[in-house]
Amino acid sequence: MRIIHDIGEMQAASRAARVQGLTIGFVPTMGALHEGHLSLVRHARAHASLIVVSIFVNPLQFGPSEDFARYPRTLQSDCAKLEGEGVDLVFAPSAEQMYPAGATTVVHVQELSERLDGRSRPGHFRGVSTVVAKLFHIVQPDCAVFGQKDAAQVAVLRRMVRDLNMPIEMIVAPIVREADGLALSSRNAYLSADERRQWLVLHRALQQVAALANSGETDSERLRAAALAILASEPAAQLDYFEIIDQDTLEAVADISNGALAAVAASFGKTRLIDNLLLPERQRPERRL
Ligand code: AMP
């Protein structure tokens, strides 16, 4: 496995791979890798012959009072995990190379970037779309894999790829969870044992929505009310949002019959976590002739 820090060297490696007829599958990450990230690598492998993983803690997507400085940085053990997965190339640039003095160009997916996490984290999605657009230009992948865990990010990036005609297939992989339902996240490392237990309330709220939807409830307000009641039972959870929305536009839907996304964000102590659940389109009962 080759580890590349330099942008020009990465672009040259991609060009060489293309000349050899290889297809490039790309998994962008901020490192502190866990099974969720590794599942994306496995999805990429099923779609492409050369796998590139980037590790870059992107300063542009953190707000001034967020956890950029304390975000876990574990490049060595990350590379060991990626080597175990048969990854071909790790791209780990410096912030100075990615954003040299005087860099002023950004990619901003309007409207979508101001919804969900974008509302409480101003500038976050502009930072995400800008860095992913840059990484796409550097790695030049045929396909890129993202986790459903960050559902709003998926909507923003899909729109960016469509609007800017980027010739990249977007692949979305399901959320990987611990046995008790906790969605894996690099930020779980911040949680105390108590917070970890309290955090499960998010999963319980989503499960309740799934159970009600399964038993035929389609009214979003009623589903939301049921989830909010569960979330209110955990005083340690400072709720940011619980929304039932269209997964592409991130706008509220009144009825989930055509499918919807239930998305939640809350803080526990200093740690903000997100989770979500896709509610499938309801099968309409077959009409008797
Ligand atoms: P991050 O390093 O947090 O920026 O995440 C890099 C990629 O891994 C993103 O596409 C995330 O959505 C994805 N990811 C993070 N956690 C999970 C998880 N538990 N299951 C699936 N994908 C995940």
Image (cartoon, rainbow, N blue to C red):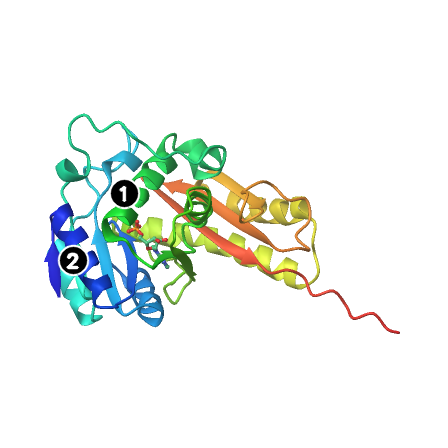
Is residue 161 something that shows in the picture? yes
* Amino acid on which the number 2 mark rests in the picture: Ala
Q: Residue at x 58, y 47 (%)?
A: 246
Residue on which the image places disc 1 = 134
Quadrant of the frame with the C terminus? bottom right
Q: Which mark is residue 13?
A: 2
Q: Nearer the viewer, residue 132 or 11?
A: 11
For the view shown, which residue lies furthest in the front direction?
A: 19
Q: Is residue 140 above or below residue 71?
A: below
Residue 102: x %, y % from top left: 19, 25
Q: Residue at x 26, y 60 (%)?
A: 34
Q: Nearer the viewer, residue 236 or 124?
A: 124
Q: Is residue 172 above or below residue 106?
A: below
Q: Say which element carries label 2.
A: helix
Q: Residue at x 45, y 48 (%)?
A: 158
Q: Nearer the viewer, mark 1 or mark 2?
A: 2
**CA–CA distance between discs 1 and 2?**
16 Å
Residue 162: x %, y % from top left: 46, 47
* Amino acid on which the number 1 mark rests in the picture: Lys
Give the side of residue 190 with respect to residue 154, left or right. left
Give the side of residue 43 with respect to residue 98, left or right. right
For the view shown, which residue lies furthest in the right direction?
A: 289
Mark 1 and mark 2 in contact? Answer it, CB < 8 Å: no
Q: Say which element carries label 1.
A: helix
Is residue 234 something that shows in the picture? no
Q: Nearer the viewer, residue 227 or 102?
A: 102
